[in-house]
Image (tube, rainbow, N blue to C red):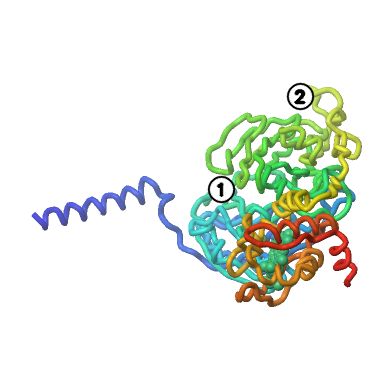
């Protein structure tokens, strides 16, 4: 009996193998050959299609940096980036490739960073293996098992803040058989920015945690800034070209209703996967998701690319352009060739909000504490956590902190100028970097009065004039 069952199992296994090899030849695993360095591109460029018909070991080198760049005219922002720009560089590999990923964090970075690639099959998408301190590098590898278009992003705590500051990009895993050839491929990624000032308020704008939690961005943009892809920076094509857009959504919060005014997508790889839909007007791109769309441009003109949640397009920046040149084709369309109806002067915004920054002045200590709580939620809780408990080994606690309570003026200095180097809080050593927080004297007084009278701390009031003294270096 044992023998009978044994041979029965054996022949079943053989039969299965034969079936897999002959009926599903695609299931045969290919053997890796050679190795190559990946060429990565900044948006809107896409690396050239893969011509190999075998898998290889692909080496990817990507550097995280923290840089001040234009977010809108007159508005700057400290972006945290993969490769120096937002969105991060586009990565293109082939299904079956073995990827060796080198993440380097620039020595000037203030923050540690890592990477979670949605194309990875493995814990955290690589996040834990790639946690990289400033000036350091890490390496991990993964097999690109599933074809598709995937988002990658930083996943260092506070995760929302790292993504909100610009840390996302796309990785395409081309199917074994490749993608059908087209005339133009472009990389377009949507995301939001949450700033202290309202839309268009000039200057270097700090990140606003409170707005991020409420999911009320001031900016919704394509490829990292208002007007990144308009006017003479528009995407270009010629009449008759077949276009493929690789679309990503870095979020951190909003879902995009991606639409090209005056075009119909002939094909859509819904959510960046393998199912194709046809004749689509608007494709949904989830936060942390993607879409691939293809269409042929049959007539010349300026085609406006929007998030069809339309106030985002005309009031928050989610507007890009595709300029198509060539002869008119009156059988398909006769009329004006410019989208003048949709083109506001300056190519961006229809009517600014015109709101002024709130200049709250506390009259009592209770008012100071109440306002300080709001400032804390927006500016400090991301690192020091909502109850001031910090994160062990990374962000020191403010709750019960002897460091804070023994020298409030020193704490004011930390908020104004930042703090780095070794310190000891309640007998525990920390050696991190706290960036200076852009707050007025009134706001620093409010937030520190709040902190010194919350989370079990008992302290006195800090006044704006005390903060002014610290700022002046007294
Ligand atoms: Cu990061």
Q: Nearer the viewer, residue 48 or 113?
A: 113
Residue drawn at (85%, 49%) of the image: 361
- Side of 226 relative to 2 (left or right): right
> Residue 79's x, y, as percent?
76, 57
Neighbor class of circle 1 (other Cα within 10 Å; few <14, some 14-19, many 20+) is many
In this rendering, the answer to whether 143 lies above or below 178 is below
Q: Nearer the viewer, residue 446 or 366?
A: 366
Image quadrant where residue 65 sits: bottom right
Asked if the residue at label 1 sits under 8 Å from ligand 1, the reply is: no
> Residue 226's x, y, as percent?
81, 45
Give the Cα separation between the discs numbered 1 and 2.
Answer: 33 Å
Residue drawn at (70%, 34%) of the image: 259
User: Can the viewer see residue 211?
Assistant: yes
SS label for mark 2:
loop
SS label for mark 1:
strand
User: Can the viewer see residue 186?
Assistant: no
Residue drawn at (52%, 51%) of the image: 176
In this rendering, the answer to whether 194 lies above or below 298 is below
Which quarter shows the C terminus? bottom right
- Side of 26 relative to 12 (left or right): right
Task: Report the residue marked by disc 1.
Answer: 148
Asked if the residues shown at circle 1 and circle 2 are in contact, with their CB atoms under 8 angstroms apart, the answer is: no
Extreme-left residue of the structure: 1
> Residue 208's x, y, as percent?
75, 51
Task: Report the residue marked by disc 2.
Answer: 332
Residue drawn at (68%, 55%) of the image: 161
- Side of 395 relative to 365 (left or right): left
> Residue 302's x, y, as percent?
82, 35
Of callouts 1 and 2, the N-terminal one: 1
Q: Exactly how many numbered labels are in the figure?
A: 2
């Amino acid at each position: 009996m044992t023998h009978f069952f044994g041979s029965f199992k054996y022949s079943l296994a053989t039969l299965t193998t034969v079936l897999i090899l002959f009926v599903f030849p695609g299931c045969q695993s290919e053997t890796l050959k050679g190795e190559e360095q990946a060429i990565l591109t900044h948006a809107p460029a896409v690396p050239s299609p893969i011509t190999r018909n075998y898998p290889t070991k692909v080496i990817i080198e990507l550097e995280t940096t923290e840089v001040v760049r234009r977010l809108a005219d007159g508005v700057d922002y400290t972006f945290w980036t993969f490769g120096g720009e937002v969105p991060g560089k586009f990565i293109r590999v082939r299904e079956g490739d073995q990827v060796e990923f080198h993440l380097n964090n620039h020595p000037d970075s203030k923050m540690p960073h890592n990477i979670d690639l949605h194309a990875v099959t493995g814990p955290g998408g690589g996040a834990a293996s790639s946690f990289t301190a400033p000036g350091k590098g890490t390496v991990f590898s993964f097999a690109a098992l599933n074809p598709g278009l995937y988002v990658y992003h930083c996943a260092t705590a506070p995760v929302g803040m790292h993504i909100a500051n610009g840390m996302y990009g796309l990785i395409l895993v081309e199917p074994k058989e490749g993608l059908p050839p087209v005339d133009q491929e472009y990389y377009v990624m949507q995301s939001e920015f949450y700033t202290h000032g309202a839309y268009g308020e000039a200057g270097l704008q700090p990140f606003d945690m409170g707005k991020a939690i409420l999911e009320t961005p001031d900016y919704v943009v394509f490829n990292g800034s208002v007007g990144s892809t308009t006017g003479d920076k528009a995407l270009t094509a010629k009449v008759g070209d077949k276009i493929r857009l690789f679309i990503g959504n870095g979020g951190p919060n909003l879902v995009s209703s991606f639409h090209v005014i005056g075009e119909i997508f002939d094909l859509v790889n819904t959510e960046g996967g393998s199912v194709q839909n046809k004749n689509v007007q608007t494709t949904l791109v989830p936060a942390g998701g993607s879409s691939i769309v293809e269409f042929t441009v049959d007539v010349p003109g300026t085609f406006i690319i929007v998030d069809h949640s339309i106030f985002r397009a005309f009031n928050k920046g989610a507007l890009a352009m595709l300029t198509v040149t060539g002869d008119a084709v009156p059988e398909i369309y006769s009329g004006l060739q410019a989208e003048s109806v949709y083109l506001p002067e300056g190519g961006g915004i229809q009517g600014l909000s015109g709101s002024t920054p709130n200049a709250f002045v506390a009259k009592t200590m209770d008012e100071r504490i109440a306002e300080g709580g709001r400032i804390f939620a927006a500016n400090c809780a991301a690192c020091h956590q909502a109850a001031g408990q910090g994160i062990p080994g990374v962000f020191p606690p403010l709750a019960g902190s002897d460091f804070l309570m023994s020298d409030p003026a020193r704490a004011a200095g930390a908020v104004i100028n930042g703090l780095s180097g070794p310190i000891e809080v309640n007998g525990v050593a920390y050696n991190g970097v706290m960036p200076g927080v852009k707050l007025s004297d009134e706001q620093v007084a409010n937030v520190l009065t709040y902190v010194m009278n919350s989370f079990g701390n008992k302290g006195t009031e800090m006044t704006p004039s005390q903060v002014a003294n610290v700022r002046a270096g007294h």
